[in-house]
Structure formats: C-alpha cells, structure tokens
Amino acid sequence: MNIALWIVQGLLALVFGMTGMMKLTQPKAKLAAQMGYVEDFSQGSVRLIGALELLGAIGLILPALTGILPMLTPLAALGLVLTMIGAMLTHLRRKEYPMIAANLVLLLLALFVAYGRFVAYPL
C-alpha cells in the first residue's frame, strides 16, 4: 500500500507541478489556446490557481519525504481535491464535459492519497 501511495503521490505531484508552473509562468493569452477556461478568470486568478497547484504538488512529496510535518501530505491531497471540485464546476458551467472526466480521475487519485495517508498507511 505504501508503494502504491508513493507512486500516486509522485504522479499527482508531477501533473499538478507542471500545470501549476505553466499557469504561473505563461501569460493568460498563451494559456487560453490550451486551456479555454482561463478566459473566464483574471490573470491574477489564474496565477493563484497555479500557485495552489504547485504548493499542492510540493505538499504531496516534501513533508512525507523529509518527515517534517508529514500531516501536511494528506492535507495537501485534500487541497487538491478541493481544487479539482472547483475545476469540475468550472468545466460543467462551460459545458466542457470531457474535461470533467480528467478532473474526476485526478480527484479520485488525490482522495486515495488523502485516505491512504490519513487512515490506511499514515506517515
């Protein structure tokens, strides 16, 4: 179970780290070509979402790896669950139904990490 949790934590950290960095470093106009929903948000809001995703990615790995405040790992996973709920609601409002499936997969993986690190195999 621990190995499965580490694999999922690594995959989630990679996905959220990459998307978070994109939202933090690229202008909104360039992101709009790949992520149409950014048109609904200000540049500041897109940067905030990117920062939250990047912090979540770091929180999935660093506390568990160092042993410093390891309770932050499942909390980071829960934060990413909330982020995915917001993403799903945004895509639902925009009628971007295929994107909801991708968000649901990420949400379920983050829930798996949260449950695993809170209950099944705590750090």
Image (spheres, rainbow, N blue to C red):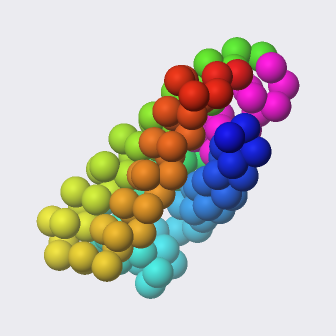
Q: Is residue 7 above or below residue 104?
A: above
Q: How many marks?
A: 0
Residue found at the very far bottom of the displayed protein: 33
Extent of the magenta region: 55-67
Left or right? Give the position of 114 relative to 102: right
Q: Nearer the viewer, residue 103 or 122?
A: 122
83 falls in the magenta region = no
Determine whether 82 is above or below 25 in the image: above
Vertical position of residue 94 compared to residue 6: above or below: below
Residue depicted at x 17% and y 75%: 95
Position of the N terminus, as image quadrant, is top right
Provide residue 41's location: percent of width, then percent of height: 31, 59
At 35% across and 70% down in the image, what residue appears?
101
Q: Which is nearer the eye, 62 or 40?
A: 62
Residue 55's x, y, as percent?
A: 61, 39
User: Is any part of residue 25 visible from this angle?
Assistant: no
Does 105 sit left or right of 121 as displayed? left
